[in-house]
Every structure is written in structure tokens, then in C-alpha cells.
Image: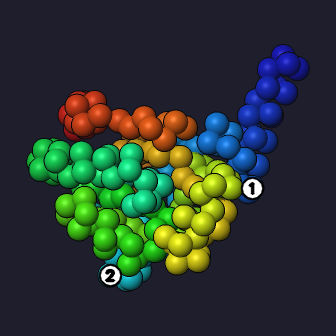
Amino acid sequence: MKKFFFMVLAVITSTVNAQNTVPKTALDIAPLLIGEKIPNATLKTSENTDVKISDLLKKKKTVLVFYRGGWCPYCNMHLQALAEAEKEILDLGYQIAAVSPDAPKNLKSTEEKDKVEYTLLSDSKGELTNAMGIAFQVPENYKSVINANSNGENKSFLPVPSVFIVNQEGEILFEYISPNFKHRISNELLVSVLKTLK
């Protein structure tokens, strides 16, 4: 019994610590779990207007994507793939929103380059990414890239690429989180999950 108590305490402590300090690597993160609620945060659109995440989620069930930035080729392939599946996702009653540390002006170029019509949001300060438990300390070789793409706002973190399916109350129904940034959820699996949750 004592051993079980200490194990539970260790898990709670590591989760609390992960929310307060940015983990060193993508393998050290402690993300929110299925059934937990998305914390509220104010993000920026590509037009540089404020959006409260809670207001966005109230509109429709949401496929909430976190990506590293428009400079990342794997992220661009993922955003393009989502754009190809967007009609099917919308027909199932969902909206798509994708969040990155990029500054609003860089979201605009990503929209054009990746032919994205769904919502891209800027979390340059990492408010939402950190609260979700998916931020980790940026490796040295990426610091100049993220600093430039966030307009000097972000010098310290990267998000682990993640997809959360969230209901209108902000509860997480499904999540796909891959510390290996080269691995992303396929459209086939995503659509299959959305159909199951419908």
C-alpha cells in the first residue's frame, strides 16, 4: 500500500512540476489527459486579433492541432494533409484549429504556402502550449529559428506535435501526441476516430 501511495504521489508531483517548469526534452512532457479540460488562453489569429480558446471551442467540437511552426517541413506536410481532409472533417461536425509559436504574420505565409483555410493561431509566449503540458525546452540548434519565427517572443520552447479532439465544453475526448516530430496522425486514423466519437 505504501509503495502504491508513493507511486501515485510521484506521478502527481511530476505532473505538477511539468506544468510549472518546461521539461528538458520531448520525452519528459506530462500532457493533459483524456477527460481533462483545455485551459483557457488568449491566442492571436493571422490577422493579429485576440481569440480566447474557450470562445473558439464553444462553436463546435474541435480538432486542436499543435505544431512546431511554418518553418518545419513535417508540420507543413501535416497541415497540408489536414487541409485535404478538411471537408470531410467539417461534414462530421468538427472545426480545425492549429496552434504554433509562430508570430501572426508568419501564420499568414503558412496559410498561403500550405493552402490552409482552417484557423491558425499564434501562441508565441507558450501560454496554452505550456498549460497543455506539451512544451519542452528548445534544442540549441533551433533557438534562432524559433526566435525569428515568433518575432522574438519565443526563445525557450517547442511544442511536441499533438492532436487533441475536444468537445464544446473543452473536454479532451482523444489525443495523439508524438515526441518524435516526424510522426503525425494519418488522415485515415483521424477521420476514423472522429466518426467513432460522433
Q: Dot 2 surroundings within 10 Å: few (below 14), some, or many (20 or more)? A: few
Camera-side residue of 174 and 1 = 174
In the image, residue 68 sits, relative to residue 34, either above or below, namely: below
In the image, residue 86 sits, relative to residue 108, either above or below, namely: above
In the image, residue 122 sits, relative to residue 139, either above or below, namely: below
> Which quadrant would the N terminus be assigned to in this image?
top right
Q: Do the residues under discs 2 and 1 have CB atoms within 8 angstroms?
A: no
The residue that mark 2 highlights is 47
Camera-side residue of 42 and 12 = 42
Residue at disc 1, secondary structure: loop
Camera-side residue of 168 and 154 = 154
x and y percentages locating residue 198 in the rendered image = 22, 38
**Where is residue 143, by image quadrant?**
bottom right
Residue at disc 2, secondary structure: loop
The residue that mark 1 highlights is 21
Q: Dot 1 surroundings within 10 Å: few (below 14), some, or many (20 or more)? A: few
